[in-house]
Image: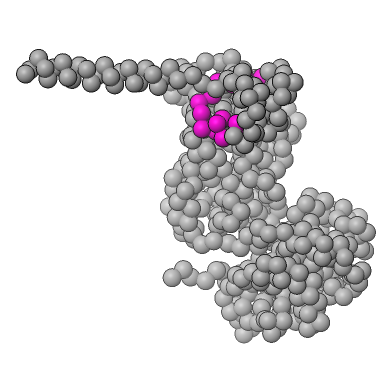
């Protein structure tokens, strides 16, 4: 019986080992396999699905990719081949563990990347700790009082800045990840461990989350590795600043940033080695103990639908004066899709798409968002903040933006606030705009909008309402009875969570 039992155990072990060896021996998809599937008449969708579900060993060098279309492989399949193994299928460098990350692991890296929003711009960032620390570029956030991070088209939450280093253009933010349990954490490389964080000729990939897209990845090679920076042939993009650069092991080895002259030659976008951010991360961890935890509430986001463009194209000529008003020392323009279409084609006086060129795509007439543009009418006045009230409750903006405009007398700030389409609506009863200047933020310029303006805005957005319905408004606390005795920033906080 003992012999039989021993034989049975050995047999099971042999079967198990044979099974494991069979799995290890499973061939990986190659370029030739893809060509065979194409020549067999399989659909593009079917081939892409097969690539996504299989282990691959593609040759994605420029010469190999260039040869595939000549053999009938469509571009969609080429993109699927690149996406199947972006980290190292063709690197000439073999790391110690010799392992390539799987597609599932790459998706986890993608889930650590997000869009960072501030009053002065947008960029990318990535989560570096389970308690919600985020690395991004310092120039993206600037001196902004509004900070938020967006994980996908529907989820955006507030962020706090804990530490900044203008020299390396790095900032550490803090968010409450309780609202986003599926968020991933990017593993950080560290040269003090058993191998370098990055070596020359190693395959790299950066993941960015720019303004109009999400989770865009670009591959390249580490051409040179300095003490503080990495020189690579990755095509750097301004909108991807603050995003991570991963090595072939799937570790964040660098951050896309704006490098100052003493770091990597002239001021250009480049890659800072991740080790240079460690002191700043340590500083942020200490600061976490001194400030309240950020709220875990969701902030308003852009609608996912598009405004019916045929309604914009067939709209009557817009009399811009009907959408303009004055609030104290400021000029205000209410920008519906039709107004923005008019601006894009002809411009109008004080505001044009040339002035808003960095936001021209965001201001597209296809976006079902109401924009309010605020500009000082004299050089002695500087814009600081705007608030919009529906009846006696403040409407939370989707996005507050401050735009610097160069003049003969220096630079002035202007405001561009994005709201839900029905933020200015007759349903509110009364709609009030409050504007604060930088020189005297406690002085409030207030104006109640004419009912004709409310009716006009409702009419302009009616094609969108008819197709998708009226979106909900995110309202904050009630407007105080007087602003003379109360500091405005004390009543601009979001409502308490229950």
246 versus 434 height, above or below: above
Is 53 inside the magenta-drawn segment?
A: yes
Q: Residue at x 48, y 53 (%)?
A: 180
Name of the residue lying farthest toward the left: 1
Residue 493: x and y, percent?
56, 69
Q: Is residue 461 above or below residue 219?
A: below
Q: Quadrant of the C terminus?
A: bottom left
Give the residue drawn at x 67%, y 40%.
240
Query: Is residue 165 positioned above or below 30 on the image?
Result: below
Where residue 261 sits in the image (x, y, percent)?
A: 72, 31
Q: Where does residue 186 sit, x and y in percent of width and height?
A: 50, 38
Counting every numbered tag in the picture gives 0
Scheme by which the image is coloured: one colour
Picture residue at 35% right of the left edge, 21% below the top:
20
**What residue is shown at x 62% (from left), y 85% (from top)?**
481
Q: Which residues are magenta?
A: 47-61
The answer to whether 200 appears left or right of 368 in the picture is left
Depth check: 405 or 449 in front?
449
Closer to us: 162 or 421: 421
Looking at the image, residue 248 sits to the left or right of residue 426; the answer is: left
> Going by the image, does 26 lie left or right of 405?
left
Q: In the rendered view, would you say 99 is above or below 268? A: above
**Residue 97 visible to an observer of this rendering:** no
Q: Position of residue 253 (x, y in %)?
A: 55, 30
The furthest residue to the front: 41
Please tell me whether residue 244 belongs to the stretch shown in magenta: no
172 left or right of 142 in image: left
| Residue 13 appears anywhere in the view | yes
Quadrant assignment for the N terminus: top left
């Amino acid at each position: 019986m003992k012999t039989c039992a021993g034989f049975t155990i050995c047999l099971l072990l042999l079967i198990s080992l044979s099974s494991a060896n069979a799995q290890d021996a499973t061939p990986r998809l190659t370029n030739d396999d893809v060509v065979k599937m194409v020549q067999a008449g399989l659909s593009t969708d079917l081939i892409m699905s097969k690539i996504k579900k299989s282990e691959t060993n593609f040759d994605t060098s420029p010469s190999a990719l260039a040869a595939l279309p000549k053999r009938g492989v469509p571009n969609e399949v080429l993109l699927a081949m690149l996406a199947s193994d972006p980290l190292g299928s063709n690197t000439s460098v073999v790391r110690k563990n010799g392992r390539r990350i799987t597609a599932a692991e790459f998706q986890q890296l993608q889930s650590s990347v997000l869009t960072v929003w501030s009053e002065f711009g947008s960029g990318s960032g990535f989560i570096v700790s389970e308690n919600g620390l985020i690395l991004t570029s310092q120039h993206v956030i600037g001196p902004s009082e509004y900070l938020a991070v967006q994980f996908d088209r529907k989820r955006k939450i507030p962020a706090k800045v804990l530490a900044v280093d203008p020299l390396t253009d790095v900032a550490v933010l803090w968010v409450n990840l309780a609202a986003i349990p599926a968020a991933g954490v990017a593993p950080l490389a560290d040269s003090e461990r058993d191998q370098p964080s990055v070596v020359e000729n190693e395959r790299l990939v950066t993941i960015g989350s720019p303004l109009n897209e999400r989770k865009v990845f670009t591959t390249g090679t580490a051409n040179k590795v300095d003490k503080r920076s990495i020189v690579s042939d990755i095509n750097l993009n301004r909108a991807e600043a603050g995003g991570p650069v991963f090595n072939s092991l799937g570790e964040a080895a660098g951050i896309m940033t704006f490098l100052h002259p003493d770091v990597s030659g002239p001021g250009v976008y480049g890659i800072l080695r991740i080790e240079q951010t460690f002191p700043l991360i340590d500083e942020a961890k200490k600061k976490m103990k001194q400030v309240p935890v950020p709220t875990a509430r969701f902030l308003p986001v852009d609608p996912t639908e598009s405004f019916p463009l045929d309604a914009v194209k067939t709209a009557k000529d817009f009399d811009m004066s009907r959408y303009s008003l004055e609030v104290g020392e400021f000029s205000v323009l209410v920008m519906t899709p039709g107004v923005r279409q008019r601006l894009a084609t002809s411009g109008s006086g004080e505001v044009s798409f040339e002035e808003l060129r960095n936001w021209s795509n965001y201001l597209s007439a296809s976006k079902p968002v109401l924009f309010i543009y605020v500009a000082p009418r004299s050089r002695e006045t500087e814009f600081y903040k705007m608030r919009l009230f529906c009846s006696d409750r403040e409407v939370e903006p989707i996005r507050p933006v401050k735009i610097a405009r160069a003049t003969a007398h220096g630079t002035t700030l202007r405001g561009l606030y994005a709201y839900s389409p029905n933020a200015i609506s007759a349903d509110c009863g009364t709609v009030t705009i409050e504007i604060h200047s930088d020189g005297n933020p406690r002085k409030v310029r207030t104006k109640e909008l004419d009912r004709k303006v409310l009716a006009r805005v409702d009419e302009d957005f009616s094609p969108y309402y008819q197709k998708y319905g009226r979106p909900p408004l995110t309202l904050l606390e009630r407007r105080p009875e007087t602003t003379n005795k109360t500091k405005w920033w004390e009543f601009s906080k979001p409502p308490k969570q229950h």
